Image: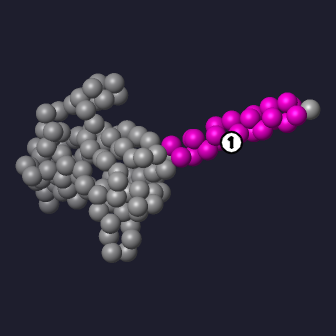
């Protein structure tokens, strides 16, 4: 009888861990990308982070994915992607954003940005398709 209780406790623990792990791995929520720049201008775009604690956000590492990640995702890695910088920002109202910027103008009308997010709870590769309209 004691052995059965111990087995039940271990099984319950394993089930609890299996339920908890997927939840902890999905500790980030991201909105769509908002492009603030036009074709021929330096890139300026932002993504709102919707489901992450501010303390964890401070430790997030976000960057454009490696050429190998692009290849694995069957996307074209353009050399200009090396200049895209991803930085985090916490606005006065408490909302969290990731900003994607370049110093040099972007002359490609479309870009696939594959962003590599790493944080204590996991890793996420997120693809954003960017369409740069001509300036008005």
Which residue is drawn at the image coordinates 29% and 62% (left, top)?
A: 89
Please provide percent x and percent y for residue 35.
26, 55
Q: Does residue 40 show up?
A: no
As drawn, the residue found furthest toward the front would be 2
Tell me, yes or no, whether the highlighted magenta stretch contains residue 48.
Answer: no
Which residue is drawn at the image coordinates 25% and 32% (left, top)?
A: 66
Judge left or right: residue 62 versus residue 79.
right
Please provide percent x and percent y for residue 81.
18, 39
Tell me, yes or no, whether the highlighted magenta stretch contains residue 13.
Answer: yes
Q: Which residue is mark 1?
A: 16
As drawn, the residue found furthest toward the right would be 1
Q: Nearer the viewer, residue 79 or 134?
A: 79
Which residue is drawn at the image coordinates 24% and 50% (left, top)?
A: 86
Circle 1 SS class = helix
Q: Quadrant of residue 70?
A: top left
- Magenta segment boundaries in residue numbering: 2-25
């Amino acid at each position: 009888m004691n052995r059965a209780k111990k087995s039940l406790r271990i099984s319950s623990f394993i089930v609890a861990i299996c339920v908890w792990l997927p939840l902890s791995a999905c500790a980030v929520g991201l909105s769509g990308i908002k492009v603030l720049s036009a074709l021929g201008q330096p890139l300026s775009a932002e993504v709102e982070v919707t489901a992450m604690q501010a303390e964890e956000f401070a430790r997030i590492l976000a960057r454009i994915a490696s050429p190998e990640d692009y290849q694995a995702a069957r996307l074209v890695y353009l050399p200009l992607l090396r200049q895209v910088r991803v930085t985090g920002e916490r606005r006065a109202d408490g909302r969290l954003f990731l900003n994607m910027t370049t110093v040099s103008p972007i002359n490609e009308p479309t870009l696939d940005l594959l962003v590599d997010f790493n944080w204590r709870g996991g890793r996420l590769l997120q693809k954003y398709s960017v369409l740069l309209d001509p300036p008005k």
